[in-house]
Image (cartoon, rainbow, N blue to C red):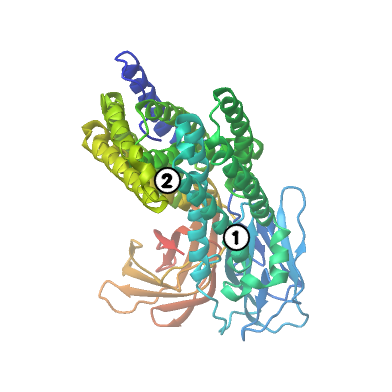
Amino acid sequence: MSATAPFAGPSPIRRPVAAAALLAALVSLVFGLLLAGAGPASAHAALTGSDPQDGAVVDTAPKEVTLSFSEAIAVGDDSIRVLDPSGKRADTEAEPRDLSEGGTVRYGVALHSGLPDGTYTVAWQAISADSHPISGAFTFSIGAPSETTVALSSQEAGGGPVGVVYDIARYAAYGGFVLLVGGSAFVLICWRGGASALPMQRLVVRGWLTLTAATLVMLLLRNPYTGSGKFADAFDLAGLQSVLDTKPGAALVSRLLLLGAAALFIAVLFGTYARREDEQERKDLTFGLAVGGGVVAAGIAATWAMSEHASTGIQASIAMPVDVAHLLAVAAWLGGLASLLVALYRTPDIGSAAVRRFSAVAFSSVVVLAATGIYQSWRQVGSWSALTGTRYGQLLIIKVALIGVLLAVAWFSRRWTGRLTDTAVAPSGGKKKAAEENTAPDEASDDVAPERAAQLARQRAVLTATKKKRIRDADPERSGLRRSVLAEAAVAVVLLAVTTMLTSTEPGRTEEEAAGGATAATAPAAGGPVNLSMPFDTGGQNGKGTVRIDLDPGRTGSNDLHVWIDGSDGEPMDVPELKLALTLESKDIGPLPVVPNRLAEGHWTASGVQIPMAGDWKIDVTVRTSDIDQVTIDKNAKIG
């Protein structure tokens, strides 16, 4: 979300009203972002289960491996790979079968028959419904766990150099859209004279070029971005064809077609429209350009809405038009802000009326952004914990803070806008004097060669522009407004970068749901050996001692357990019976019994202790030191 000097007019009555309205919008926005929501949602797809499960040990080789996801995904030939302990393919290398039914999204791959015992690695990669690549890996064992030589790349899907370039193109596309749409709207709504100003023309054309080039780069890199991660595959025709068959590919192609219509719009705006002098004709052409340009701008904004976060999850039919309105408001505000900055620094002719009109447009944009931002935030975050505990929520907090800074700077811009007058552009008598100065040489122009006359004309034009610039720069109100708008633009650039990061970040609601799923089985959770020390006292003779536990590697899947018991004198202590049980109370899992075998005096061990999922596990230890003396002690440990 995003705004500029969103207050207009010097009226002492309207100022507090506008200020109160802005404050109310900002407060509503901030508190709206914190609204807790209910109901299922999804954006980035998440792996919610598998058969066999992560870390499972099965007696016989399964005929296939299946994976379940939180939402629809797009898969290819190598989306699911099963590798044996030596790293060779254990699956039939066919395209995954769609086994989805009802609301469950599940895909499976068949395995070769007669697979030997050992640990197998399942590596998967797909594209979620919001266009972002996802990947992960987990292991299961047949018969018993074994060593494995499989070494998977640590690079996440969509990462690496290709991912960096793709993300840069994504940012450039948003920036180009803002300049193209916001600059055009600024000329049509706020300053029609800007259609003849070369700096304004350059700004809008550069926005169009940036958006077009970024879209082409994203289209070419889409295949390696979601697949191999190699730049060379950008020109793979088969890969490009497969991209065109996807929703993101169709959106990018549609954007290119709409940019062709936008090029025609720009040609008319800065050609026919700029040359129109008849007021009625220009008014009619303004209406036609506003309607046509609005349709094209909404269509370009829809190419984002139809292929990213808004297109999936709860209330997609509402979220997509809301997202279009959000993007158009961003462009009107930030693009208009950039246009105002260029006009104030590069053209001497923009008047106070144009600045005040933009102030009104910016305020309207803030209202739209507040309303759409509240809805988007509820939809993508949904809870306090997701707001503060996920990367998406934290980025959203940064974004709201930047908006607050931007609005604070806009307050100062509003003050300069209220003082702005047009006298600095054309002081009393200045135009007449300039006209007299400019016509004096023309009286003798008949005696001057054509080349010399042209040279004199250029010199007079430069002299006039220099005088106007000097007068403009000497106006303290205009200089103050320029500095304030420049500060707004600097904050807006950072805000746009954070907004772009949000579009490629898994929404907080989805991240929490995936982490809390009872059968979540994404890549094996990283962890470390668990070491516990637990004193005990059974109450009988020689009933005091200490239990020491080592669980290695201390993550989901298979673990080795070692238990040592030391007596009160610190020496190894044998006991008649030792039992353990593991419980994950937050998920109602367990107790899972473990009966270790005595290895040596005071030392027990158990291999293949299965931890089905990461969490805060309670470890109960039962120690019996005689026929009647027994105690159960417990301690919690984070595993995975």
Q: Nearer the viewer, residue 282 or 214?
A: 282
Residue found at x 69% / y 81%: 89
| Quadrant placement of the N terminus | top left
Quarter-of-image position of residue 79: bottom right
Which residue, given by chain and number where applicable, does mark 1 sit on? Answer: 216
Q: Is residue 355 above or below residue 184?
A: above
Q: Amino acid at mark 1?
A: Leu
Q: Is residue 143 above or below residue 2?
A: below
Q: Amino acid at mark 2?
A: Pro
Which residue, given by chain and number where applicable, does mark 2 sit on? Answer: 199
Q: Residues within 10 Å of mark 2 (few under 14, many from 20)?
A: some
Q: Nearer the viewer, residue 202 or 163?
A: 202
Residue 145: x and y in percent read 59, 79
Residue found at x 72% / y 64%: 242
Residue 622: x and y in percent read 44, 64
Q: Nearer the viewer, residue 265 or 241?
A: 265
